[in-house]
Amino acid sequence: MRLALVNLSYLVASVLFILTFKGLSHPRTAVRANLMGSLGMLIAVVATLLLLDWGPGVQRYGVILAGLTVGAVIGALLALKIQMTAMPQMVALLNGFGGAASTLVAGAALLEELAQGRLPSTQSTVATVAAGIIGAVTFWGSLVAFAKLQEIMPGRPLLFRGQQALNVALLAVSLLLGAWLVAAPQATWLYVLIVALCTVLGVTSVIAIGGADMPVVICLLNSYSGLAACATGFVLDNNMLIIAGSLVGASGLILSRIMCRAMNRSLGNVLFGGVGAEVVTGAAADAVYAGRVKAASAEELAMILESARRVVIVPGYGMAVSQAQHAVRDLANLLESRGAEVEFGVHPVAGRMPGHMNVLLAEADIPYEKVREMDAINPSFAQTDVVIVIGANDVVNPVARTDPKSPIAGMPILDVDKARTVIVIKRSLSPGFAGIPNPLFAADNTLMYFADGKKAVLDLVDALKQAA
């Protein structure tokens, strides 16, 4: 009876997880989807506790409750304290913790089997090896991604001679040791060695990826954490963990593929291409900008915006850093009150994680129907009076269309350069993560406003009000 109840609970939780992924596909249903996912996980956890055999061998019920309490408190504090601008770093850490948990649980299950005088099955040992390899790579790779996003370490790719050969060798040796462990599961030191090698692999594989590719890396690490959990589900013979891990792993891979398509790059190119490895400065930047960049004041820009009938605002990571989303909403409302049509153009990889800009705009209560994706907004730029670019760089760089040798060659961009007037708000002419200058900043129809994103938008709002 208890087993039937647990299986029914797992079925309900699985359905809720599937509905969660469906609901997360649109901002209007995302909040409800998160609640359904949380409910599904609660049901799964309670059902798993019911499945345990609370006999003489299980005497740590208090430890489990203590762990749940500590985890709940930490999760609540992070949810309340983490700024939206730091959400990519938060996601990277959560991916890593998932991988670490899978590695530790799989290893503990192997030790428990051996301690009870039983040799684990071949399926269980293969799954243990998979959880160790994927989980270790996920944890340490996620820590590197966090450090890059937090600017603890450089965002550009860190490359050294023979790096890719080393990564291949680490993976190959780990697989060979895994095969040895399957043949001799009592040699638990092999598992420790596998995890150690994959620790190095997780670091060396992610340090080689530049900040421009971090949205894809976060998706991929999320997929890895799901696959590690799925493998651990086979170790524990837990159907719920297998289903949940499979859903996370598959969705992460699909999203990684979508993000790569948005950048016109293959997944292998992201992992091994090293975008941003060489920062273009000096003469190259001077050749693009020298004598052609036109700076403007808030008052001059307000005069242009006064007569604009259609305005498109393009947010980038600079908006996130300055937390300018609420000021941007006030600017949009002011322009609309003066009869202008205002929309927002969002590139799929703008910011540091998928949907980063969408989340920030939603936080500022900007209507969903005004937020347009790249493919939907691009045809209208030629009929747009003014485009305001706030802190975006690579995703509006026309070099992607014109220079086949550029690191971002072929990447679909927002065609803001086709608008009648482009206002770019940036602190400086510093390049984006791809490390290349942007000819848009020196275009004839572009005016630069050098300032912090939030301050610049607030200055524009004040100048527009005074011009009334």
Image: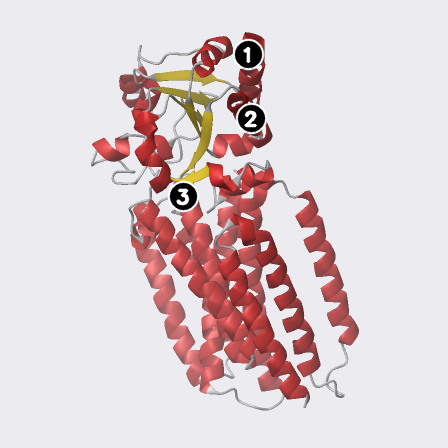
User: Which residue is the extreme one toward the right?
Assistant: 62
Above or below for 27 versus 429: below
1 or 3: tag closer to the N-terminus: 3
Q: Are marks 2 and 1 in contact (CB under 8 Å)?
A: no
Q: Position of residue 339 (x, y in %)?
A: 49, 21
Q: Secondary structure at mark 3?
A: loop
Name which residue lies at 50% across and 53% down.
142
Name which residue lies at 51% across and 66% down.
18
Three-letter amino acid code at the position of disc 1: Ala
Q: Position of residue 141 (x, y in %)?
A: 47, 54
2 or 1: tag closer to the N-terminus: 2
Above or below for 6 versus 18: below
Q: Position of residue 26 (x, y in %)?
A: 49, 51
Q: CA distance from mark 1 to mark 3?
A: 32 Å
Three-letter amino acid code at the position of disc 2: Asn
Look at the image and tell me in which quarter the C terminus lies: top right
Name which residue lies at 58% across and 69% down.
104
Q: Which residue is mark 3?
A: 348
The residue lying toward the viewer, choosing from 18 and 172, is: 18
Above or below for 212 versus 448: below
Is residue 107 shown to the viewer in this render? no
Three-letter amino acid code at the position of disc 3: Pro
Q: Position of residue 140 (x, y in %)?
A: 50, 56
Q: Which residue is mark 2?
A: 333
Q: Which residue is mark 1?
A: 463
